[in-house]
Amino acid sequence: MTSAIIVARMTQRYKPHKEPDGTWTVIDARSERPAEMGSRTVIGMNQQDAEEFAELFSRLDAQKQDTGS
């Protein structure tokens, strides 16, 4: 992992987190709870999916912040 990716992950709102059972969860860094998409929590996935969802959610959150919504 490059240092640019590490720095970006440090500032992202949503982060992938490996659970003790080996599955992955997307964590909302503000609430420190699993992220939600609609009425579903983003849990029980593989690492690649968790990383992609975390990146997508963080990007959408940043866009939302930029537009002032």
Image (cartoon, helix red, strand yellow):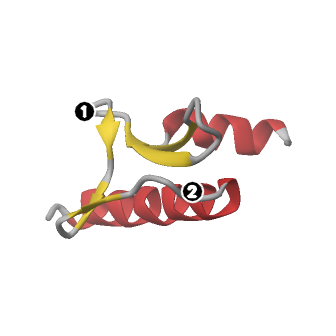
Can you tell which of label 2 and label 1 is closer to the viewer?
A: 2
The residue that appears at 49% across and 66% down in the rendered structure is: 56
Q: Give the answer, above or below, for where 5 lies relative to 30.
A: below
Q: Give the answer, above or below, for where 64 lies relative to 8.
A: below
Q: Which residue is mark 2?
A: 50
Mark 2–mark 1 Cα distance, whole angstroms, equals: 17 Å
Q: Nearer the viewer, residue 51 or 25?
A: 25
What amino acid does circle 1 point to?
Ser
Q: Is residue 40 left or right of residue 23?
A: left
Q: Is residue 61 left or right of residue 21?
A: left
Q: Which residue is mark 1?
A: 31
Other residues around mark 2 within 10 Å, as few (<14) / some (14–19) / many (≥20): many
What amino acid does circle 2 point to?
Ala
| Quarter in which the N terminus is drawn | top right
| Quarter in which the C terminus is drawn | bottom left
Q: Position of residue 52 (x, y in %)?
A: 60, 64
